[in-house]
Image (cartoon, rainbow, N blue to C red):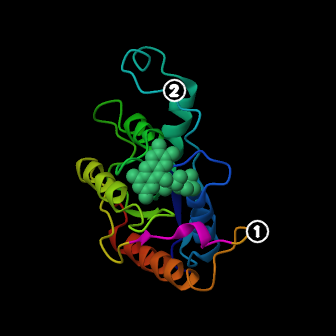
Amino acid sequence: MSNVYTVAVLVGSLRKQSINRKVALALAGLAPANLKLAIVEIGDLPLYSEDIDADAPPAAYQVFRERVRSADAVLFVTPEYNRSVPGVLKNAIDVGSRPYGKSAWSGKPGAVISASPGAIGGFGANHHLRQSLVFLDVPCMQQPEAYLSGAGSAFDEAGQPSESVKPFLQSFINAYGQWVERNKKA
Ligand code: FNR
């Protein structure tokens, strides 16, 4: 049997009806047999400060770091806020990057997909996020690029992707399955 890789999925929106959460859940359902996706929640992480992280780091930091560390791969599904990464997602990235020298992200094959009701599909957030991933040593899938525009009408009431969006999500997650296999951490 081929390997099965666990994927920590980070969603950059805390909104109950988040389009990006729907994207993440749809990808979990469409994932190829070698990927097992699970959302890692980021909404309860205190804003990062080295002061609170010093002697007795918050339990939420430790739980989050362990969840990322124990995953084989990391997938980011994010909206764009003011042409960049939402603060809540950047905060999670910062929390996972410390303590210095013990980053939870290091070497895990990653991918980014952004979704927006707007016309450019979160392009700015998608690429700002990639900048951090370079520094964090996350080999990030280049193709297919995934900017889901006009995403306000991409899902039905039950969170199912429309027939026009589903093939795009399917090809993205299939490619990511191959990317994880090729770039798995030794
Ligand atoms: C937005 N939105 C937005 N959209 C976009 O395409 N580019 C942007 O720069 C911004 N900026 C922005 C800032 C802030 C503070 C908010 C709250 C929203 C709109 C955004 O794409 C929309 O609210 C999405 O529905 C958010 O994603 P979720 O929560 O549905 O996953």
Residue 122, numbered circle: none
Q: In the visual, does 98 lie left or right of 89?
A: left
- Asked whether mark 2 lies closer than 8 Å to ligand 1, one says no
Badge 1 local density, few (<14 within 10 Å), some, or many (20+)? few
Q: Nearer the viewer, mark 1 or mark 2?
A: 1
- Residue 147 magenta-highlighted: yes
Label 2 environment density (alpha carbons within 10 Å; few <14, some 14–19, many ≥20): some
Q: Is residue 130 visible?
A: yes
Q: Residue at x 57, y 85 (%)?
A: 164
- The residue at which mark 2 appears reads as 46
Residue 80 visible: no
How far apart in space, not on screen, are marks 1 and 2 (Cα)?
Answer: 32 Å
Q: Secondary structure at mark 1?
A: loop
| Near-viewer residue (14 or 173) | 14
Residue 26 x, y percent position in the rendering = 62, 70
Q: Could you say which quadrant of the image residue 74 lies in?
A: bottom left
**Of the residues shown, which amino acid type is indicated by label 2?**
Pro
Q: Which residue is mark 1?
A: 158
Residue at horizontal 46%, vertical 64%?
Answer: 118
Q: Position of residue 162 (x, y in %)?
A: 63, 80
Q: Is residue 59 above or below residue 142?
A: above
Sequence-wise first label, 1 or 2: 2
Q: Which residues are magenta?
A: 146-155
Tell me which amino acid carries mark 1: Ala
Q: In which image quadrant can residue 53 be found? A: top left
**Location of the C terminus (image quadrant):** bottom left
Q: Is residue 11 above or below residue 89?
A: below
List x then y, in percent, for residue 145.
Answer: 35, 73
Residue 45 part of the magenta segment: no
